[in-house]
Image (spheres, grey):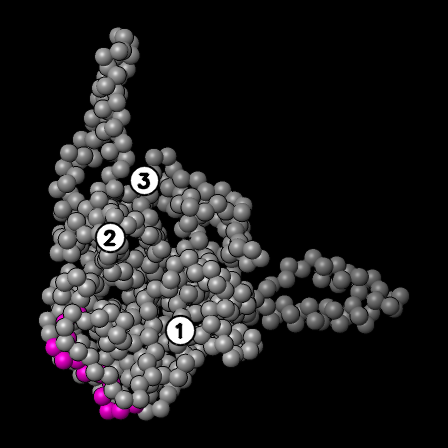
């Protein structure tokens, strides 16, 4: 049975086409991985099928009474809402039913017999629905999910705007699970999640009976939960049975076959055109030339997909710093309350250390305290000599209306337009991306703009806060290669062992000093 039908979908932003005549069917129980390079339109596709975005052309049809749960990578939570209130909002339709039930009860006194019978019938239906969806035990269900995701340790009455990226993702995941949707739409759910909760989500999706569509660049995670791949490339959507590794095998064979067919056809076209050119003027051979021309005109020309620019990252290196990068003395980090025990950490020149541990225990706060952006509650940080620090933040400022060009020009005012364009192109961005506003780009493309700023500045120390979030497979591989080649020191926050293995010289487990282990 088809849950979702998408027919002849076309969409674009300005003169940049995203889809062209795309059709798609989702069947019950299908576990789909939606893959493709950054900027191919995966999040746009999700926004269209959920009704957040109207397509330029085409039809999107859901089956009747389908409950859809969507985890968006860019969801903004409202200030003033607590974790408990966000989780409870999963039951909003049930609270509306209760309101309707109360309204019926208020109007019963003025009803005649026929109206009364109709009201009683509607009341019975609503009551049955509320019972079936566990309406009267909502509070205990909210508490149960809160415990499973470690939200009770953060504090269920905490304002959601005070949470870290990983904690926000957990809250949204919890809300989704409470909704019990017939289909899950997950847009990069592992971004900002720590290893423990990625493992928990993996088990949940493996046991999930209904259908889901998952966007992820975390290949081991993807392989463990999906049975179908839909690949987005060059405005098309192609279906492959099996996991990501199987898709890569089939895709490379298809690509090789298409290239071989293209070469054969180009040769044939060249021979036919040559024959026509030599023989069309001669009376004796004109008919043969015309028949070959007709063959040329009718020929369906094979087109090869344009190669996407592969990112190239080369970090510029500043002069050699002193022996010590930084030293902390009894440092206690936090905001209103402490997040750590007194810290005595030392980092030396040439070290490449990765910080691991659950979300919300203070990894980003430690970065900001080292840089002096967030004052420590007590203790001190002593920075070494001759440091040139490069800092990669998790997120860009929302609603950024500048173009990519302007964003780089702000950082490097002496650059010519050619130099700015060249720097962005090396990070894997096309001309259309470069001229677009930053806010309309995908999460991965925005990350490439931030990396562009970083690699073009001379540094000898890099502080990288989850740099792999949103990046596609090619960009991740290139970033790992560039960081391995970098001769400076690196302090990295990362939840992907596949990325930092072979790169990090030291792994610092933040659970050793954190006061919160949520």
**Is any part of residue 268 visible from this angle?**
yes
The residue tagged with tag 3: helix, strand or loop?
A: loop
Q: Are marks 2 and 3 in contact (CB under 8 Å)?
A: no
Q: Relative to 407, is 219 on the left or the right? A: left
Identify the residue position indicated by label 1 in the image.
451
**Is any part of residue 229 visible from this angle?**
no
What segment carries the magenta color? Answer: 321-333
Quarter of the picture holding the N terminus: top left
Q: Relative to 216, is 140 on the left or the right? A: left
Q: Residue sitting at 53 percent across and 54 percent down?
A: 12
Q: Relative to 135, is 299 on the left or the right? A: right
**Residue 150, position in %: x, y?**
15, 56
**Residue 264, position in %: x, y?**
61, 70
Identify the residue position indicated by label 2 in the image.
160
Mark nearer the viewer, 3 or 1: 1
Identify the residue position indicated by label 3 in the image.
67
Q: Residue sitting at 63 percent across and 67 percent down?
A: 265
């Amino acid at each position: 049975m088809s849950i979702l039908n998408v027919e002849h979908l076309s969409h674009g932003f300005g003169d940049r086409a995203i889809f062209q005549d795309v059709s798609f069917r989702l069947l019950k129980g299908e576990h789909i991985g939606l893959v493709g390079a950054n900027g191919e339109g995966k999040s746009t596709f999700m926004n269209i099928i959920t009704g957040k975005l109207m397509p330029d052309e085409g039809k999107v049809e859901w089956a009747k009474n389908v409950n859809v749960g969507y985890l968006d990578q860019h969801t903004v939570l409202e200030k003033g809402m607590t974790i408990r209130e966000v989780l409870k909002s999963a039951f909003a339709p049930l609270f509306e039913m209760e309101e309707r039930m109360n309204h019926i009860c208020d109007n019963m006194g003025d009803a005649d017999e026929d109206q009364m019978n109709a009201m009683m019938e509607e009341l019975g239906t609503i009551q049955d629905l509320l019972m079936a969806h566990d309406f009267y035990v909502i509070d205990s269900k909210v508490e149960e999910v809160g415990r499973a995701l470690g939200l009770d340790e953060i504090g269920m009455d905490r304002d959601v705007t005070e949470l870290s990226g990983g904690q926000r993702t957990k809250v949204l995941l919890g809300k989704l699970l409470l909704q019990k949707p017939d289909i899950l739409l997950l847009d990069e759910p592992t971004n900002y999640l720590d290893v423990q909760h990625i493992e928990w989500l993996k088990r949940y999706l493996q046991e999930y009976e209904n259908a889901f569509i998952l966007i992820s660049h975390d290949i081991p995670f993807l392989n463990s939960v999906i049975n179908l791949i839909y690949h987005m490339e060059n405005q098309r959507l192609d279906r492959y049975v099996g996991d990501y590794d199987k898709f890569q095998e089939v895709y490379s064979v298809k690509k090789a076959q298409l290239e071989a067919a293209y070469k054969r056809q180009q040769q044939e076209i060249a021979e036919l055109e040559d024959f026509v050119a030599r023989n069309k003027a001669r009376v004796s051979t004109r008919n043969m030339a015309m028949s070959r021309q007709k063959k040329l005109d009718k020929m369906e020309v094979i087109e090869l997909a344009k190669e996407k620019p592969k990112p190239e990252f080369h970090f510029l290196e500043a002069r050699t710093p002193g022996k010590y990068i930084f030293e902390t003395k009894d440092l206690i980090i936090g905001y209103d309350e402490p997040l750590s025990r007194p810290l005595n950490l030392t980092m030396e020149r040439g070290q490449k250390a990765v910080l691991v541990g659950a979300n919300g225990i203070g990894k980003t706060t430690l970065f900001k305290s080292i840089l002096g952006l967030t004052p420590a509650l007590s203790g001190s940080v002593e920075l070494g000599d001759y440091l040139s620090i490069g800092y990669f933040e998790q997120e860009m400022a929302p609603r950024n209306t500048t173009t990519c060009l302007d964003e780089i020009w702000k950082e490097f005012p002496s650059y010519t337009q050619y130099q700015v364009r060249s720097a962005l192109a090396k990070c894997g961005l096309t001309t259309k991306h470069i001229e677009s506003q930053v806010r309309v780009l995908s999460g991965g493309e925005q990350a490439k703009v931030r990396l562009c700023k970083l690699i073009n500045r001379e540094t000898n120390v890099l502080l990288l806060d989850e740099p792999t979030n949103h990046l596609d497979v090619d960009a991740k591989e290139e970033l790992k290669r560039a960081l391995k080649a970098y001769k400076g020191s690196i302090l990295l926050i990362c939840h992907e062992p596949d990325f930092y293995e072979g790169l990090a010289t030291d792994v610092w487990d933040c659970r050793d000093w954190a006061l919160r282990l949520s």
